[in-house]
Each structure stands twice: as C-alpha cells, then as structure tokens.
Image (spheres, grey):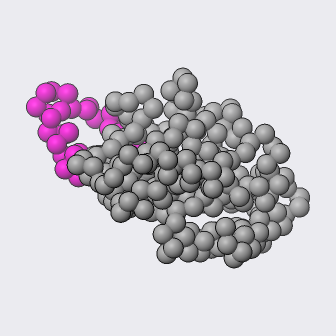
Amino acid sequence: MTSNYLKRCADVAKLLCADTTRERDSLFNDFIEIGALNFSIACDPVHREARLLRRDALFEEYDSKMLGRFLEAFEIVAELALSNIENGKIADLFGYLFFLCGLADHGQEFTTTDLTRLMSDIDMIHIKSLPDIGFVDLYDSAVGSGSTLLSGIEALMKKGLDPNRHIVALGNDVALRCVHMSYFQLSLYGIPAVIIQGNTITEEEFSKWYTPIYIKDKWIMRKPFSMKGGWSRADELLKITTVPYYGATLEAYQLMCGTEKKDGDEYTADDGAEKSNPEQNT
C-alpha cells in the first residue's frame, strides 16, 4: 500500500465517521449499500424498481450534509480504483476501510490483500494463457469483501488476460454487507460478475447482483450463475429484457408449443423479487 492510498482511505473513513450520532457500523453499511444500489439501478432492469425504493429509503435517513460526505467519499473511492487500474492492479478497497472505521472487532474480518495475492499467484500457476472457451471464470463461495476474487483477477492480468473481456467473477455470501462490498468493487473495476446473497450450505438465494459490464456485454448468455445451477427466474428476466433475440425466440417457441403466457400472466419486475434474510449483515 502506498502512502497516498493509506491517506485517501483515511480520508474516506473520516468522512463516514463524521456523524457521531450514528453507529459506525450503520454508516459503513449504508455507504457501501448506496454505492452498490447506484450501480445496480443504472444497469439492471430486473431489480431496478425495488432498489430505487430501497435507495430512496436510505436517503431519507440522512440530511444533505451527510449525503454530501457520502458523495465525496464515493469520489475518493473511484479515484483510488482508477489509480489501481492505471497501475495494473485490482486491489480490495473496502477491507482496509472496514478496519479504519473501527469495525474489525464486530465479529467480522476480511483477508488482507497481501495474503489473497499470494494465494492467487499460487492458485493460477496452471493457467498459462486464455483457454479455448475464451474466458476464465472465478468463483468464491464466501466472497467477503471480494479480495480473493480481485486478487485472482489481478493474477490473471499478469498472464495477459483482459479483466473486462476474458474473466467473469462469480461469488456468494450470506452477509448482505459482503455482497455489497464485493459487488461495488467489481462494478468499479469493470469486471463481468454476478454476486449472490445466499446460503452456501442450503443453496438458498436471497438476492442477485449483476455488474454493469456483465449486463452490457450479455454475459448472461455465456455464463449464467445460480447457486443450485440450472434455471433462474432472475436470469430469464434479464435475458428477455436485455437480449432482444432471446425474447423473440422464446415467444416463438412458446407459440409453437402452445405454451404462450396468457393475458395478465406476463413477466414483471416482481418475478425477480428478493427474499428477506434475517442475518443479512452478520
């Protein structure tokens, strides 16, 4: 970590902790969630309506001064991500910030970048070049802040792979805070990715988050991801709303087979609605 990186992270922590009337845990969670919501609202037609409502509810909880601090913090985070990209790095921005906000003693810790980089360099030894399939998919079943995925992407970049075209990141975590942290960062770095809030053991899914470039480049047709595998309603809705030929082909197939949907039975945004999870931020 450079001295400038440490200073700018400290600046973000100072902005987030400026409101002494609130718990730091809540301030950090809301900052990360608003950032994740902003990306999702901008690109995801399946979940846009529900996430707009959620973001509006969060905005209502803060005055204009604190929202201004959040905006300033977002600008610093974007600056750090851009600096990393220019230097060929894809580093975790939020694990250290979590520590600076004094939250490491709240029962949750995140693996440091130095360790995840070492793990990834060892794990990626067998990959020499771009596979014939045209991409490499990375998966983390307890994604945390996203540090392991990010370090894996960085290791593949050293082998000449383009992180925006040759790599797709897939991850899940039961803690919604972790989902927001990893999704926010993968979106910032322009990585095709799907992050699911779900239980790895029971394979139950609570919410699904597609990064902007995953949707823009139609990765849903190349590498869909659900915890149980196979069909996913949210994935089908995304295909129908973002890949015109898929929707037309599906409609033609339904007409041929006599399985077309009846009036009033069309797909709606509610079909991709998210389930509540009582343990979302633990």
Q: Is residue 245 magenta?
A: yes
* Residue 89 in the image: above or below residue 224: below
What residue is drawn where x is 69% and y is 41%?
Answer: 281
Residue 265 location (% of width, % of height): 33, 33
Q: Quadrant of residue 72?
A: bottom right
Please state the total of marks drawn on the protein image: 0
* Residue 166 in the image: above or below residue 209: below
What residue is drawn where x is 33% and y is 44%?
Answer: 223
Residue closer to the observer: 79 or 112: 112
Q: Which residues are magenta?
A: 243-270
Residue 247 location (% of width, % of height): 23, 45
User: Which image quarter is the C terminus in?
Assistant: top right
Residue closer to the observer: 231 or 146: 146
Residue 258 location (% of width, % of height): 15, 27
Residue 29 location (% of width, % of height): 71, 52
Q: Quadrant of residue 28?
A: bottom right
Q: Residue furthest top?
A: 202
What residue is drawn where x is 62% and y is 45%?
Answer: 144
